Image: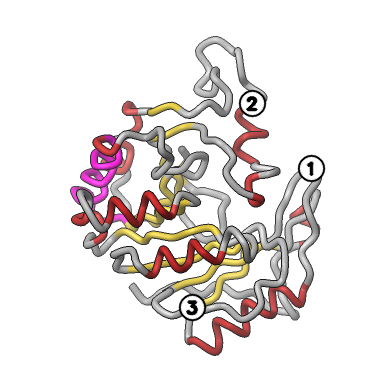
Amino acid sequence: MADNSTIEWTDATWNPVLGCTKVSAGCAHCYADRFMERFRGVPGHPFEHGFDLRLAPAKLDQPRRWKRPRRIFVNSISDLFHPQVPEAYIADVGRVMRDVPRHTYQVLTKRHERMQQLLNGPLSWMGELPNVWFGVSVENRRQGLPRLDALRQTPAVVRFASVEPLLEDLGDFDLNSIDWVIAGGESGPGARPMREEWVLGVLHQCRRDGVPFFFKQWGGVRKHRNGRLLRGRTYDEFPAN
């Protein structure tokens, strides 16, 4: 976890779960996998077990110690709705978000079906929290766009889509009931290229449907060289909540 995150659309990261497993095309070059595996086998290191999924209950209280209100990306190196995360533990994370309402929590998942099931069922109270945003990753048409459909059927005060890494033209897609879109390219070794027309297509959809648009990065092997400008300007829009 980190305060003062370098992720452009958040202020801090909070990881009460560590590690994950790859589930779709967007996971192929996962930065968290690459980073955490560097420390596999290092005794006593927080990532001693590499990218293996494990709970980190010692980190649950971190938001309580941050006194200044922040936007907090929940599980930036994992997925809260991973099938190996017990429902009771997801509820523990939710209770922290409920009990520390000065922060805004951004929960992003690729496990849309489990999120939809739990927030429409035993954890419905989490979907009613005014300071929690729930989002899904949308990297392509086949795997990403169905997540948007599931998100629309999931109770949330704010729903968002992280269109990163954008791997293809998404075509004409539905942003009904979506409150925010982040778009960006893949970064790091082996980064797959992103075309400008794909990004402009997403921007056009957002403008058509009145959805705030945040352009995170072009990505690439050296992402800082490629920057964040889209047609000569930055897009740093956020939902009104």
- Decide which of tag 3 and tag 2 comes sooner along the chain: 2
Which residue is nearer to you in this view: 177 or 153?
Answer: 153
Q: Does the magenta stretch mainly form a helix, a strand or a loop?
A: helix
- Answer whether residue 164 is magenta in the image: no
- Answer whether residue 93 is magenta in the image: yes
Checking the image for residue 175, the label placed there is: 3
Q: Which quarter of the figure has residue 119?
A: bottom left
Identify which residue is drawn at 64% across, 62% down.
140
State the CA–CA distance, disc 1 to disc 2: 15 Å
Left or right of 180? Residue 124 is left
The boundaries of the magenta stretch are 89-103
Q: Residues within 10 Å of mark 1 (few under 14, many from 20)?
A: few
Which residue is nearer to you in this view: 164 or 24?
Answer: 24
Q: Which residue is mark 2?
A: 37
- Decide which of tag 1 and tag 2 comes sooner along the chain: 2
Q: Which quarter of the figure has residue 145?
A: bottom right
